[in-house]
Amino acid sequence: MCAQRHPPSAVGSSLPPELLANALTAIDNPVFIADRQGHIVWVNDAFCRISGYPSDEIIGKNPRILKSGVQDTAFYRKLWETILAGNTWRDDIVERRKDGNLFTVEQVITPLRNHTGVITHYVAIHHDVTRRKQEIEHERHLAYHDALTGLPNRALFFDTLKQAFAKSGRLPNSLAVLYVDIDNFKSINDTLGHHGGDSLLLTVADRLRAAVRKTDTVARLGGDEFAVLQADVDGPEIADKLAAKLLDTISRPFMIDGHKVHASVSIGVAIHPGDGDNAQDLLDNADQAMYQAKNQGRNNYRRHCPTASRLMVSGQKFNAENAAGQALSKRSRIRRSPRIAS
């Protein structure tokens, strides 16, 4: 048995001390009891299992033997201030097992008093919430990261961009957004199949990650679209240099399922200040610049140009209106056509 020594008897209890000790030993929640100086005097089997320490290695030790380093000094100061004042303390705490692995427990520490009201011991009851915390963290990760590549998704990228804007007022340098789109991805995907297309997207993501600085953010916005956020950009030539580097790194052949595949990207660059006073405008203008690169032959990059963007939007509007007019004219001709008897 792991449990050692009988825990202090409950004041006024009619139950035999042995029964109380057996109850604490048998329950599934990890429990330890420490004296006023913080030395552990009793542990149950569940505590030995979760901590990895046998009773003879934990009795007499301070609970700091489980300290993970996740909580700071202020956390433990507040804990001791609470229980020394005779109050119950409860909070989640990350502990370290004997083998070095971390676990998370919801811990409740209650002071125990003797018949004169003096605090003599503390009983700590744990509830293992490691799996729950891992599931919450996993769900949070999925909400803000692309499931295929593991990169930040559009939501997280946009949030990071907004935070960068908030800081930019205090920094002398600029921000740059590079909007990256794989050229002719649909054709590549149709040729390779969805598995091959996913493999290409994964490799593109890896190459983009490897090409940027640690302070830059790479995200997958969706489909075959990626984005890079450069913070603290000394000048536009820094963004130009990165765009050229990305073009070069993606143009190198890919080996997908044993086949050599050639791909390229079109990149749009927008820089704050100048190309957008807020996160949405900067991202939109980088997107427009990417389409300018597409229209000018692909496998290149273009900086945002307001005039070119207006011409592009006007052309798109004209084409849409022209297509709508042709459709209306066609429907009108159909309605005027005489019905032919069968």
Image (tube, rainbow, N blue to C red):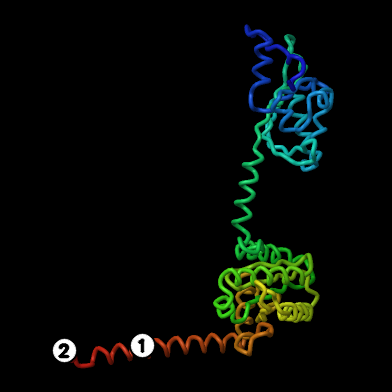
Tell me the SS state at disc 1: helix
- Which of the two residues, 251 or 322, is positioned nearer the viewer here? 251
Question: Compared to 7, does 207 lie above or below?
Answer: below
> What residue would you read off at disc 1?
327
Are the residues at dot 2 and dot 1 in contact (C-beta closer than 8 Å)?
A: no
Among the 4 quarters of the image, the one containing residue 234: bottom right
User: x and y percent of residue 151 in the render?
Assistant: 67, 63
Look at 71% across and 39% down and name the residue there.
103
In the structure shown, which secondary structural element does the residue marked by tag 2 occupy? loop
Residue 61's disc number: none
Q: Is residue 279 above or below residue 275?
A: above
Q: Nearer the viewer, residue 73 or 294?
A: 294
Image spot of residue 238 (x, y percent):
79, 78
Q: Is residue 153 above or below residue 179?
A: above
The amino acid at mark 1 is: Ala
Q: So how many labels did they put on this image? A: 2
- Residue 259, horizontal then vertical, whole percent: 66, 76
| Drawn side of residue 62 relative to residue 139, left or right | right
Residue hosting label 2:
342
Query: In the image shown, does 272 or 97 lie closer to the viewer?
Result: 97
Task: Give the residue displayed 79% in from the left and 38% down from the top.
Answer: 99
Q: Amino acid at mark 2?
A: Ser
